Image: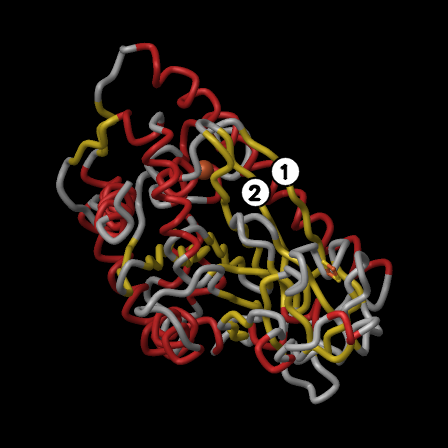
Amino acid sequence: MQHGEQVRLIRRILAHMAAGTTDRGEVAQSPVTRYLSPERLAQEQAMIRSLPVMVCASSSVAQPGEWFTHDLSGVPMVVARGQDGVLRAFINACRHRGARVVDGACGAGRRNFVCPYHSWSYDLDGALRGLPHPQEFPDLDRAKHGLVPLPVIEMCGLVWAVPAPSAAMATAADMRAWLAPMAADLALFGYDRFVAHDTRRFESKHDWKLVADANLETYHFKFLHRDSIAPLFQDNRMVADAFGDHWRITLPKESIVQLQGRPEAEWDLTQHCNIIYYFFPNLMFLFIGDHATLFAVWPRGIGASTIDAITLIPEPPATEKARTYWDKNVNIFWDALMEDFHLMDSMQSTFASGANTHLTFGRSEFCSAAFEESVERHLGGHPA
Ligand code: FES
Ligand SMILES: [Fe+2]
């Protein structure tokens, strides 16, 4: 983020502090049926697959021959760095009879991929290289039987792919245009060079959208997080900026009062705020000064999601002391986040009870409401 933008955000925060206010929108409601309907869930899954989603950290596929598989969208994908240094993404399906060509989560040192079933082999650029007994396929057009490519780019230290491209999201250029406004902010923090330190996956018992709803407001901080991070942060205060369907939410800490009376040239937003970059549809990227923890939320069923998380740090820890420092930061993050995840389980467990036909978002929860509206709008292109 440019320094000028940091100063503008800090000015907005200080003005809110003086007035006892926060960024606000209108009161809004969201029907509980949105979190209970199998038809709708299928539409939402199709919508997510049609947009750029995080596959892994760039550092996981930095070297030629490194590869990484991803199945959470429902489309089996594999990304691989070719011997030419180019990163490519494919549907992980053999063009013979459809077996998964690449088994396992990730690896290194590959020069090609060989299907375990009948040994059709593919170069890392996806081209069909060879098959046993080729006389059994006299009319095979090899050029038409390479692995099916998917659009892929690297941005913010992450690999992004579109599992099910559409006319509107078919190329790397489409993906860049979609992500660029947010990525420009993060690039200035150096994320393009960061490496994955801690990766984790876990299942949770709630609708995927509740995670966005929870992380796009600070109304709950003082209560839900009273024993963890609440003392650091201001009560019910944030400044929020929309970048298309994405959001940047700046969360001021109590310590920001130290900037009052100091020259603006010395103001450093990152010392006194956490920043959430929510990449629509399903990636929350929390910028915490010198590192970031981010996670994608994948719908798995009614009231069931998978969380796919990475912490990005500036360089691999060279000493035990450095490792301990990063581990401690990661643990603080997840201790607080698990407070949210438990509450989301709690919410989901009441939705079918009939107590609420709608959830209500207050004025300072307007970004959560806006996220729900973005989902509604995007579902228009994915009818049941
Ligand atoms: S399915 Fe892959 S070689 Fe037959
Ligand atoms: Fe929270």
Q: Position of residue 284 (x, y in %)?
A: 46, 52
- Per the model, the C-alpha gap separating discs 2 and 1 is 5 Å
Which residue sits at x=52%, y=66%? Answer: 160
Residue at numbered disc 1? 202
Q: Is residue 129 above or below residue 70?
A: below
Locate the C terminus by quadrant. Answer: top left
Q: Is residue 12 left or right of residue 275?
A: left
Nearer to me, 375 or 165? 165
Give the SS element for disc 1: strand
**At 66% across and 49% down in the image, what residue appears?**
330
Q: Which sits in the foreground, 165 or 24?
A: 165
Judged from the image, the secondary structure of the residue bearing numbered disc 2 is: strand
* Residue 200 seen in the current view: yes
Q: Nearer the viewer, residue 231 or 172?
A: 172
Q: Is mark 1 within 8 Å of ligand 2?
A: no
Q: Are marks 2 and 1 in contact (CB under 8 Å)?
A: yes
x and y percent of residue 352 in the render?
35, 15
Location of ligand 1 given as a quarter of the image: bottom right
* Residue beneath the point at 39% across and 72% down: 170
Residue 222, quarter of picture: top left
The residue type indicated by label 2 comes to Ile
Q: Position of residue 280 (x, y in %)?
A: 37, 56
Residue 111 locus on image (x, y percent)? 81, 78
